[in-house]
């Protein structure tokens, strides 16, 4: 399968976007207004990849990924906006990938989660990132995140924990460290920690 990896155009986009290269951007409606977003993230089947590690414990996560691909002028306006958290969900609503892959290293193993639901992807990204935070700090629950709350208002995906079901396609038992991390994630998200043996995650 032929694939293309798309990353933000920065810093070159600041020059191309202001002095030319208009075809690189497409206008997307956001609430009562609009923003220009990199046309590459709106073409063909798209997969959003979210690595969770010490270096990427604060994202970008699924709901704020699209805002990283804004036109330089729109990106600057976004960064100084008072309601930036809520705006990120609005921008994501008009440029969602078809599938999400979330991955993190757990001990000597690697955990992979896949979903077609952007809210489920955001929730699990937040839950998996918590183990890299300072244990002395009190972290808000993933469902309390303002960007995620806006996404539920927009009905971009699941609305309550009961609408998520975890499945695994690993034959036999999962490694203990991965099973423990999934159980912790389910507890943080209010999900049933009993995973059925199947392929995929929703």
Image: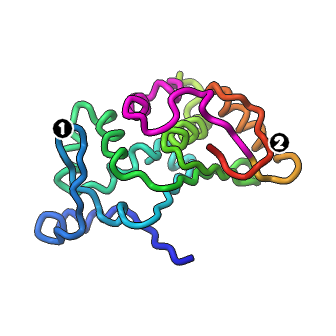
Q: Nearer the viewer, residue 128 or 112?
A: 112
Classify residue 130 as left or right of residue 80. Answer: right
Residue in the picture at 65% in, 33% down: 185
Classify residue 112 as left or right of residue 170. Answer: left
The stretch of residues the image draws in magenta is 139-167
Q: How far apart are marks 1 and 2 (CA)?
A: 49 Å
Q: Residue 10 appears in which quarter of the rendering?
A: bottom left
Residue in the picture at 46% in, 45% down: 61
Q: Nearer the viewer, mark 1 or mark 2?
A: 1
Label ID, residue 32? 1
Residue in the picture at 66% in, 52% down: 112
Residue at disc 1, secondary structure:
loop
Q: Which residue lies under the disc numbered 2?
A: 176
Does residue 90 sit above or below 35 in this rendering? above
Q: Which residue lies furthest to the left in this view?
A: 19
Q: Residue furthest right?
A: 172
């Amino acid at each position: 399968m032929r694939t293309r990896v798309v990353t933000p155009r920065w810093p070159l986009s600041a020059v191309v976007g202001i002095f030319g290269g208009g075809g690189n951007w497409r206008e997307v409606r956001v609430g009562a207004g609009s923003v220009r977003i990199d046309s590459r993230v709106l073409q063909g089947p798209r997969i959003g990849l979210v690595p969770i590690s010490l270096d990427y414990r604060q994202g970008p996560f699924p709901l704020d990924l699209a805002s990283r691909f804004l036109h330089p002028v729109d990106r600057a306006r976004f960064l100084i906006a008072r309601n930036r958290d809520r705006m990120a969900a609005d921008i994501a609503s008009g440029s969602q990938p078809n599938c999400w892959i979330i991955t993190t290293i757990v001990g000597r193993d690697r955990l992979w989660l896949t979903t077609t639901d952007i809210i489920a992807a955001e929730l699990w990204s937040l839950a998996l990132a918590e183990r890299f935070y300072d244990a002395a700090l009190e972290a808000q629950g993933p469902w309390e995140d303002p960007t995620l709350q806006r996404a539920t208002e927009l009905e971009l995906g699941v609305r309550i924990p009961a609408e998520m079901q975890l499945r695994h396609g690993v034959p036999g038992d999962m490694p203990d460290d991965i099973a423990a991390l999934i159980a912790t994630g389910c507890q943080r998200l209010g999900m049933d920690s009993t995973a059925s043996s199947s392929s995929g995650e929703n």
